[in-house]
Image (cartoon, coloured by chain):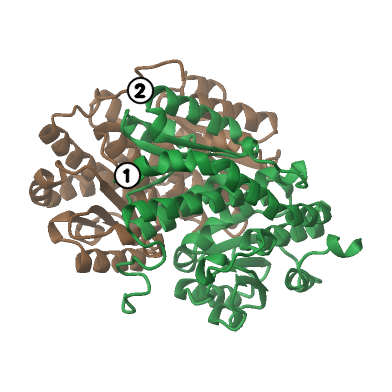
Chain colours: A green, B brown
């Protein structure tokens, strides 16, 4: 029984390195899709820790900004799927030079990031290999374990066991959500496939999923114009482009900011056309086995995984390959 | 002589209230255009303070997220031009309930925000009244004074005098920049006025200007689709939509993240068309009278003020009123 309460061995080893260290700041540092998981990680830390302030930075921004808070009392958590993202590798070196403890997430322990960090936490990703993974081995799952290890150590908050049990149940939640959403995606895909602009929207723990879906799926993979709009910032400018023709994907999560997403939904449905407003609502998912306290944190994994399948539907209809159609990324090596 | 070294009396009064208080966190909280000034304020604090961690939050996100770091040791800095933004007023009340010291910026001291905060710092804004102001009385100018007051007190960093002298010279920098940029705006406006999508881009101290220009000018005032893209995040997804037809406004500032903007410029000019890439470069401005150490912080004011005039050019060409054309904002009162 006790086994299931323990975090992944890589996480445990990284946390062990905190013995005897003072920690007064956490930096979450990455680029693009890997940056997107840092938003919910900080959300969790913000809600659980009184002792650890934190920042989320794009890796190049972090290195050039050079925040004064970065010292030997900092923990810097980095992520790059391949472990080769140049800016993130440079950020790890920069952080180590400042004496910070670096913990990096990558699928490749032998990568430059893995080799250039104090601790490597491995994870699995389906998107490069095409081989399905269990979501409990994803980057989200591992970074949440790191965050809970920090709050366990510095704030006395004990939630690791509940997280580990919840992660065991997660893949089944995602699989069931795929079935629930399939008819809805069938309905929306033909219309969305014709769009030149599709906005994404969310808040709180789900904002990262909206961020990666806009940047790394719609813009990068489908060359569709987008913008991940924060669900409340929407009302302070961006909402003026809403009309009967404008398309939005709104993620409604289960964290404490859900009222912001509810308000955005009401407005979108009032002034937009129903066929243009794709709402993915986590209350429609069956979270059996997932502790109430983690449903908000795990909803974005369900959003991203299910909407990933929606993106493949768009790609088929647009005849625009998901993984191969790139103008620049991995096609050029001199920028 | 000594007079010019002192911050605005409202700022001085707010800072005085820190006497005898312990401060271990700063929250910058607002919505929309007022949120945009919080990014460079945090940039300045990050680069100057080892003792004060900080966060920037949309006001509704802040209230619902309810970060555990918010305590009676927090300083919460809020801004709303009119002082009536409901989410910001609620955030001030939420922060005061937690025992935090609240300092709010508004043009209206008698507003709900002014009345609902511990300290009100007034500023001037030209955009509601149409009456030109001196930039030294803007929201940016006042929030920088607050930040420098904090680092003076908690980090022993003395820069207030240099800031106040630099602010005295700022309006003249802006006026001269308008002249320099006028022919460039003449050249780009007819083409940009026809666009359905215009992206903005910047990093570091200038990111807030890109944020407000995308959200509050292009989207809100001109109903043009946009997205304020971070200059390095661009390379991790968003850049794939770049082609010979896509339009961008890139701000190149003078802070330490300028290399990120340089790299974005080179890429934009390599794969985009020159007539679609409007680069506003702060090295072209005459910063006489502004201390070197503040040119990075003050460049975004010059960007925003000059590009504001560019927006009016677009509005004329599009026959789309800048201040009056709204579907929802100030037209509805039930959302």
Q: Residue at x 53, y 56 (%)?
A: A36
Q: Residue at x 78, y 47 (%)?
A: A289
**Is the residue A161 above or below the residue B145 in the image?**
below
Q: Nearer the viewer, residue B118 or B284?
A: B284
List the single residue furthest toward the right: A1
Q: Where is mark 2, residue-wise?
A: B328
Expressed as whole percent of the image width and height from the top left, the position of residue B222 reads 24, 34
Q: Nearer the viewer, residue A184 or B154?
A: A184
Q: Where is mark 1, residue-wise?
A: A197
Can the viewer see residue B142?
no
Mark 2, Cα crowd under 10 Å, few <14 / some 14-19 / many 20+, is: some
Is A302 on the left-hand or right-hand side of A21?
A: left
Expressed as whole percent of the image width and height from the top left, the position of residue A19 reads 81, 71
Tag 2's secondary structure?
loop
Is A27 on the left-hand or right-hand side of B178?
A: right
Q: Nearer the viewer, mark 1 or mark 2?
A: 1
From mark 1 to mark 2, how far is it between C-alphas? 21 Å
């Amino acid at each position: 029984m006790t086994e299931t309460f323990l975090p992944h061995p890589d996480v445990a080893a990284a946390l062990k390195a905190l013995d005897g260290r003072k920690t007064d700041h956490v930096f979450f540092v990455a680029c693009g899709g890997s940056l997107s998981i840092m938003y919910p990680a900080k959300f969790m830390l913000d809600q659980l820790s009184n002792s650890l302030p934190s920042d989320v930075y794009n890796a190049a921004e972090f290195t050039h900004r050079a925040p004064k808070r970065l010292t030997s009392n900092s923990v810097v958590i980095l992520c790059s799927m391949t472990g080769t993202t140049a800016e993130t590798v440079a950020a790890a070196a920069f952080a180590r030079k400042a004496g910070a403890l670096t913990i990096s997430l990558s699928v490749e322990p032998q990568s430059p990031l893995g080799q250039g960090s104090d601790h490597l936490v491995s994870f699995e990703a389906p998107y490069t290999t095409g081989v399905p993974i269990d979501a409990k081995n994803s980057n989200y799952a591992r970074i949440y374990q790191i965050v809970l290890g920090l709050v366990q150590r510095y704030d006395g908050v004990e939630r690791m066991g509940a997280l580990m049990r919840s992660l065991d149940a997660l893949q089944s939640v995602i699989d069931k959500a795929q079935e629930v959403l399939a008819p809805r995606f069938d309905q929306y895909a033909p219309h969305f496939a014709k769009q030149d602009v599709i906005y994404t929207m969310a808040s709180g723990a789900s904002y990262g999923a909206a961020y990666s879906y806009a940047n790394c799926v719609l813009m990068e993979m489908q060359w569709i114009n987008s913008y991940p709009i924060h669900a409340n910032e929407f009302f302070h400018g961006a909402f003026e482009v809403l009309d009967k023709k404008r398309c939005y994907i709104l993620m409604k999560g289960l964290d404490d900011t859900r009222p912001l997403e509810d308000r955005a939904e009401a407005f979108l449905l009032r002034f937009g056309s129903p066929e243009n407003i794709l709402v993915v609502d986590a209350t429609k998912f069956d979270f059996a086995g997932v502790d109430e306290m983690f449903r908000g944190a795990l909803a974005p994994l369900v959003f991203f995984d299910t909407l990933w399948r929606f993106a493949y539907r768009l790609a088929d209809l647009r005849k625009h390959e998901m993984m191969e159609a790139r103008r620049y990324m991995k096609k050029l090596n001199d920028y």
